[in-house]
Image (tube, helix red, strand yellow):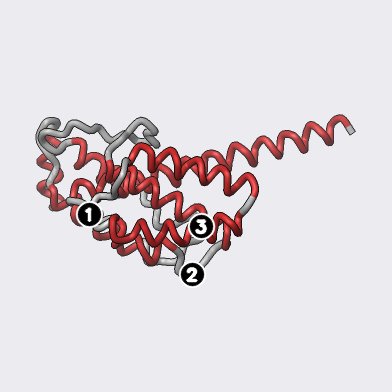
Amino acid sequence: LPAALFYAILRGAPTPLPRAALAAALRRQSLDQRKPDDTRDPRLNPARLGLIRAVINRLPNQNITMTAQLDPACTDPAYLCGRLFAVFDRLQYLAQGQLNAGISERFYASASVTPSLVMGRLFRNAQFHLAKAGGGIAENIRKDFEEITTALGCEFPPTLTLEEQGRFALGFYHQKADYRRISTERRDERDAAKIAAAATA
């Protein structure tokens, strides 16, 4: 695999990167989802996600280009399912805090392969989490659900191919990264407001 990757890199586009690299990265990603999370999120491996994106973008006859950050305009069903799964993950965290075995640990592997078998159950659980979270938090999550499901359409894909599993993974982590960005911006705004209030006191 390293030799095949090196050869494809030297040849440059449009030489495809080996699909075995995508399969290996997705397998490792699925296994890492079973590990308990912490504030550093050790499951997030930028190099691995970069490899997944590179393999997908170099596949022959691709009409979808995966970006490095969240792409709200992307209507690919696999990418949207990954984003949706991240919303479920975020909602559970907001409603219940950090768990040893949350949605990501329990359902990532099945959701990334057979989303139609998992998403209905997650939506049922989400109603309880929305009620517990309440207020503006629940309203913001509802808006995310509405935006993504509207773009997704009337049904979930029954199964995802290897390439689609890669787009699922990118959608999942792009959405998680966007949530982190929003949280950081809000924290910085609160800190700036406190400093300004202290300066005028």
Q: Which residue is mark 3?
A: 127
Name which of mark 2 and mark 3 comes first in the sequence: 2
Please name the amino acid that badge 3 sits on: Gln
Seen in the picture, residue 28 relative to 61 is either above or below; the reply is below
Q: Position of residue 24 (x, y in %)?
A: 20, 56
Report the side of 130 relative to 57 (left or right).
right
- The residue at 38%/38% (across/down) is 150
User: How far is the residue under mark 3 from the one under mark 1?
Assistant: 23 Å
User: How far is the residue under mark 2 from the one under mark 3?
Assistant: 21 Å
Please name the amino acid that badge 2 sits on: Asn
Please name the amino acid that badge 1 sits on: Pro
As helix, strand or loop, the secondary structure at mark 1 comes to loop
Kindly check if marks 3 and 1 are in contact, taking CB atoms under 8 A apart as contact: no
User: How far is the residue under mark 2 from the one under mark 1?
Assistant: 29 Å
Name which of mark 2 and mark 1 comes first in the sequence: 2
Q: Which residue is mark 1?
A: 158
Residue placed farthest to the right in the image? 201
Name which of mark 3 and mark 1 comes first in the sequence: 3
